[in-house]
């Protein structure tokens, strides 16, 4: 996952504004809000289309967020607290929503959605966790919740109307 995020980050850096709290909104009525506390946190993003929105929050040390949204009415919310956490969101289509929340150390999360009315959620608390949600189609919902250390989940859905929930933890 980290390799994918690094490659995506390199491509993103070549195609739009550089890191360190920069975001680009193209077309009409797109919205980006970034709040960062701490040291060496980085955000990069691109939105093409209409009425896309991103709310990105980081508190800690050396965390990274990369978002790419193409279409209309897509939404991304990312909140990270801790150290060395990475989040990646890539949405193409209409009315897709992705939410990522991470707290801890060295967690990685990626949400990829193509289509219409898809919802993705990832919440991780602990260290060295990784999660991927990858959905293509319409009206899909996928969520990953991981608590503890060293958990990994890959959720892939193709088609319409699929629903999946993965919960993993130390209990």
Image (cartoon, grey):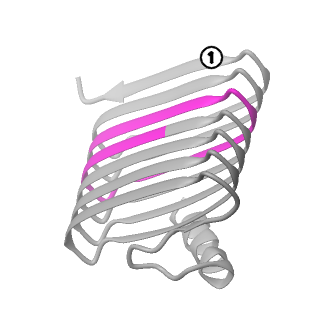
Q: Main secondary structure of the magenta part?
A: strand
Residue picked out by circle 1: 163
Image coordinates of residue 63 in percent, x first then y, are: 33, 66
Residue for point 44% across, 36% down:
122
Residue 93 vs 23, above or below: the answer is above
Image coordinates of residue 107 in percent, x first then y, are: 35, 54
Image coordinates of residue 167 in percent, x first then y, are: 41, 24
Location of the C terminus by quadrant is top left
SS under mark 1? strand
Residue 101 counted in the magenta span: yes
Query: Which quadrant holds residue 41?
Result: bottom left
Q: Specify whether 136 is left or right of 128.
A: right
Q: Specify whether 74 is left or right of 2.
A: right
Query: Which quadrant holds residue 164?
Result: top right
Q: Residues within 10 Å of mark 1 (few under 14, many from 20)?
A: few
Residue 97 counted in the magenta span: no
Q: Nearer the viewer, residue 20 or 26?
A: 26
Q: Nearer the viewer, residue 71 or 148?
A: 71
The span picked out in magenta is 99-125
Residue 89 vs 123, above or below: the answer is below
């Amino acid at each position: 996952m980290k390799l994918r995020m690094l490659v995506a980050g390199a491509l993103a850096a070549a195609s739009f504004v550089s890191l360190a709290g920069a975001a680009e909104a193209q077309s009409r009525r797109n919205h980006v809000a970034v709040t960062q506390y701490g040291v060496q946190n980085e955000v990069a993003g691109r939105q093409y289309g209409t009425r896309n929105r991103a709310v990105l929050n980081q508190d800690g040390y050396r965390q990274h967020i990369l978002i790419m949204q193409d279409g209309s009415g897509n939404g991304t919310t990312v909140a990270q607290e801790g150290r060395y956490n990475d989040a990646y969101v890539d949405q193409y289509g209409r009315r897709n929503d992705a939410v990522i929340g991470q707290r801890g150390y060295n967690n990685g999360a990626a949400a990829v959605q193509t289509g219409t009315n898809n919802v993705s959620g990832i919440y991780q608390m602990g260290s060295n966790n990784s999660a991927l949600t990858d959905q293509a189609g319409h009206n899909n919902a996928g969520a990953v919740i991981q608590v503890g250390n060293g958990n990994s989940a890959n959720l892939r859905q193709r088609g319409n109307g699929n629903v999946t929930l993965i919960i993993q933890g130390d209990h």
